[in-house]
Structures are given as structure tokens and as C-alpha cells.
Image (cartoon, rainbow, N blue to C red):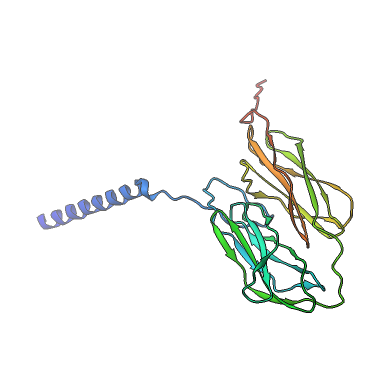
Amino acid sequence: MKNYTTAALTVIVLGLIIWGIVYTVNKSPDSTVVSTTTGENTNNTNTNTGGVIQSTIPTAITNSAVSPTDTTAIVNGSVNPKGSFTSYWYEYGKTSELGSKTSTQTMGSGFVTIQAPGYITNLTKNTTYYFKLVAENQNGRVAGSQYTFKTTEGTPAPLGSAPTTKTISANGVSRTTANLNGEVTPNQNDTQYWFEYGTTAELGNTTAFSAVGDGKVKVPVSISLSDLKPLTTYYFRINAQNQFGTINGSILNFKTTGPAASTSVNINL
């Protein structure tokens, strides 16, 4: 009987020791988990839902399909800024050493993969060229795969040019909503536009992409935001692109109204 009592006490003591260890580990500050959101969502927006969003080096994918003429070439690819303002350009040349580059263009700072069109000019007729897409942000530089194309003889350069954009002040601002406004001139080429916005000048959120046609005149555009934070300053700008390049509008800001929390009144009859 005494042996059974001793064994039972031993089991109880061991159980208490194990429970104490588990409790201590779970309560340790070192076991805190920080959520990192770096994904792309289906509506082309990225929002911080309470976790820490960390920027990383961008991604760059060169598209092997090219539209060459006698002395020009329209090239394309895609870039994901991965959380920081990102620039892109194309390097090209008559050998695999390249040696020339297009003008630098600026992407947003979100986590959405965006088309990266480029226009190469002053080429030699009937000549093979090598090219690749390059992207860079504060975290580093990355290059896509390298491909080749051959200029033609007898094909004129395409009509049109990169779009022009203008960011216009927001209106309809309330506690949690606002309308973002802008203007886009397609300059004779199929053009799409989108807005970026965020609580700092780094922006970070991207709206859906919308077509604006291929006309010659300015087109007013707008989009409505919801689920904003009350009494908070937001920064935003419009962007547009066609096959000739990506153009950014200036960054403006607005502040949502209060109160900080919604109030309700209960009336007892």
C-alpha cells in the first residue's frame, strides 16, 4: 500500500513540473508571433490588417514577346514592388553584354504584380538585339531573363506615346470613405489607370486597374474608397500606363473626419 501511495505522489509531482514548464514557455516574451502580410489579393489591393508588412527586393519577369519595327521595339514584362517604391528599366544591346538602357520609370510600393512596358528607340534596321527587364527598390536590384529580338525593314514606328496623368484633390471625404480623382490622357494608345494610397507618402495600397481608352483628350476618372480610419491623413496618387510606358501623378493627401469612434444613442420610452 505504501509503494502505491509513493508512486501516485511521484506521478502527481512530475505532472505539476511538466505543466509548469509548458506554462512558462507559452508566457515567455520570446514566443510572440508577428504576422507578416506580403500577399497579393484578388482585387489588386494590399492592406495592413494588423500584422507587420515588411518590404523585400522586387521581382522582375521579362516577357519574351516583342513588337519590333525598323528602328523601335515595344517590350514588356512584370514587376512586383514588394512593399517599397520600385523603379524599372530595360537594358539592351547588339551583344549579350547589352550596354544601353531605356529611361527609368517608377512603379508603386504595394505587393501587386504590375505590367512594366518599355519603348526602345533609335535602333538599327534588320539587326538582332538582346534585352532584359531590371527592377530596383531600397532593398536591392533584380533582373529578369534575357531574350533577343530582331528589328524589321519596312515597318514604321507605332503612333502614340506614353499617357499623361494628373492627380486631383479628393472629395466626398467622411469618417471612413473618400473619392479619389484624377485625369488621364491616353495619347492614342490603349491605356489603363489605377490609384495608390496609404497612411504615409510611401502609399502601399493599390486599387483595381481600369481601362480609359485610346483617345487624344483628357478623361476625368475617380474611384471610391471605404473602410478608411477616422481622423487619419491619407496620401494618394494616380498612375497610368500603355505600351509606351508607366506615368505617375503627383502625391496629394486628405484627412478623414471624426469622431474617432462611432456613437449611438439609446432612447428608453
Percent coordinates x, y for residue 246 in the rendering: 74, 56
**Is residue 246 shown above or below 91?**
above
Which quadrant holds the N terminus?
Answer: bottom left
Which quadrant holds the C terminus?
Answer: top right
Query: What residue appears at the point 69 percent right and 70 percent down from the top-left corner?
Result: 63
Percent coordinates x, y for residue 15 in the rendering: 25, 53
With 234 as the anchor, is 35 left or right in this view? left
- The single residue placed furthest to the right in the displayed view is 216
In the rendered image, which quarter is residue 216 located in? bottom right
- The single residue placed furthest to the top in the displayed view is 269
Query: What residue appears at the point 54 percent right and 50 percent down from the top-left corner?
Result: 53
Percent coordinates x, y for residue 43 in the rendering: 69, 55
Percent coordinates x, y for residue 188 in the rendering: 87, 58
**Is residue 84 shown above or below 71?**
above
* Count of numbered badges drawn on the protein: 0
**Is residue 49 shown above or below 172?**
below
Query: What residue appears at the point 60 percent right and 58 percent down from the top-left corner?
Result: 136
Q: Nearer the viewer, residue 166 or 6?
A: 166
Q: Nearer the viewer, residue 246 or 96?
A: 96
Q: Nearer the viewer, residue 43 or 22?
A: 43
**Is residue 38 shown above or below 65?**
above
- The single residue placed furthest to the left in the displayed view is 2
In the rendered image, which quarter is residue 124 located in? bottom right
